[in-house]
Image (cartoon, rainbow, N blue to C red):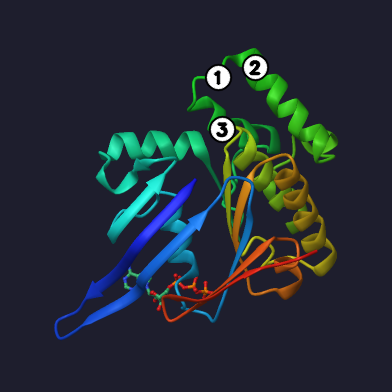
């Protein structure tokens, strides 16, 4: 599904070229649950952003479902991002002025989904995450765990095939983190490909594959047996 070949990302300063990613070769099949681990600054977020089509400033080839992403025009890449990827962030990135309901609905407004279909998708997600009673509250009125559930609901509202999560439990207590990981495991069982970056070993255990990223390179690529 995802094939990266010899990806380099670097920044040039006056005197030297600094590599953020170097020679990344990576294939991810549909339905995998992949964890990126490694020291701070190793390049995990950068790699997630490239995979999620949020960053096109790199060298090398990126194939998504047989299509060369790095040769696409921006409009085409943007459309592919919207259709296939959902993003979840450590800091939730919810819109403070919108209610829970409206936050989940927002991406659907940009996808020309009919109003009745939007209602049914949001209702289903609220129900799934036990948030029906909270639908008219604003993000600040929710716990961190609940805010992240809204973040996940919003990310999956458009039924993306790939979910990218950057430190999704970084701001959560361990029981909330466990709940989020169990949601990921369930989405993965339903067929969603999941790629997460985390510092937590216990989060990695939910996945089926662990990539150790060090200094912009894949140092280890391990299959996890459960
Ligand atoms: N646009 C940029 N210009 C210059 N340096 C950058 C840029 N983007 C990322 N970096 C640097 O690249 C390195 C990798 O950053 P990245 O955020 O991918 O690391 P990470 O592994 O996700 O770290 P963390 O675990 O702390 O989130 C860092 O040293 C960062 O400062």
Q: Is residue 182 left or right of residue 114?
A: right
Distance, label 2 to label 1, CA atoms, is 6 Å
**Residue name at image x 75 percent, y 67 percent:** 205
Residue at mark 1: 113
Relative vertical location of residue 112 with respect to residue 16 in this rendering, above or below? above
Q: Does the residue at mark 3 contact the one at mark 2 (Cβ under 8 Å)?
A: no
C-alpha distance separating marks 3 and 1 = 11 Å
Q: Quadrant of the C terminus?
A: bottom right
Q: Is residue 117 above or below residue 219?
A: above
Residue under the image location 81 percent in, 68 percent down:
174
Whether label 1 lies within 8 Å of ligand 1 gets the answer no
Q: Nearer the viewer, residue 119 or 180?
A: 180
Q: Secondary structure at mark 3?
A: helix
Q: Position of residue 40 (x, y in %)?
A: 52, 80
- Which percent across, then down, holds residue 192? 65, 43
Horizontal and vertical percent position of residue 14: 14, 82
Mark 3 against mark 2, which lies toward the viewer? 2
> 112 or 138: nearer the eye?
112
Q: Identify the residue position indicated by label 2 in the image.
A: 117
Q: Which residue is mark 3?
A: 106
Callout 2–callout 1 Cβ contact below 8 Å:
yes
């Amino acid at each position: 599904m995802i094939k990266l070949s010899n990806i380099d990302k670097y920044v040039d300063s006056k005197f030297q070229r600094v590599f953020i990613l170097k020679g990344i070769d990576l294939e991810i099949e549909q339905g995998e649950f992949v964890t990126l681990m490694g020291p701070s600054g190793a390049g995990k977020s950068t790699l997630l952003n490239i995979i999620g089509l949020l960053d096109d400033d790199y060298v090398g080839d990126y194939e998504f479902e047989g299509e060369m992403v790095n040769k696409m025009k921006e409009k085409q890449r943007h459309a592919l991002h919207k259709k296939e990827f959902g993003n979840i962030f450590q800091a939730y990135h919810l819109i403070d002025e919108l209610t829970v309901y409206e936050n989940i609905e927002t991406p659907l407004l940009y996808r020309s989904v009919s109003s009745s279909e939007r209602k049914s998708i949001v209702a289903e997600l609220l129900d799934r995450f036990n948030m029906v009673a909270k639908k008219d509250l604003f993000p600040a009125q929710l716990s961190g765990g609940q805010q992240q559930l809204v973040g996940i609901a919003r990310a999956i509202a458009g039924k993306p095939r790939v979910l990218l999560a950057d430190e999704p439990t970084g701001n959560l207590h361990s029981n909330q983190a466990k709940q989020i990981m169990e949601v990921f495991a369930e989405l993965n069982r339903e067929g969603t490909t999941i790629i997460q970056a985390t510092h937590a070993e216990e989060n990695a255990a939910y996945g089926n594959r662990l990539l150790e990223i060090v200094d912009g390179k894949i140092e280890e690529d391990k299959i996890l047996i459960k």
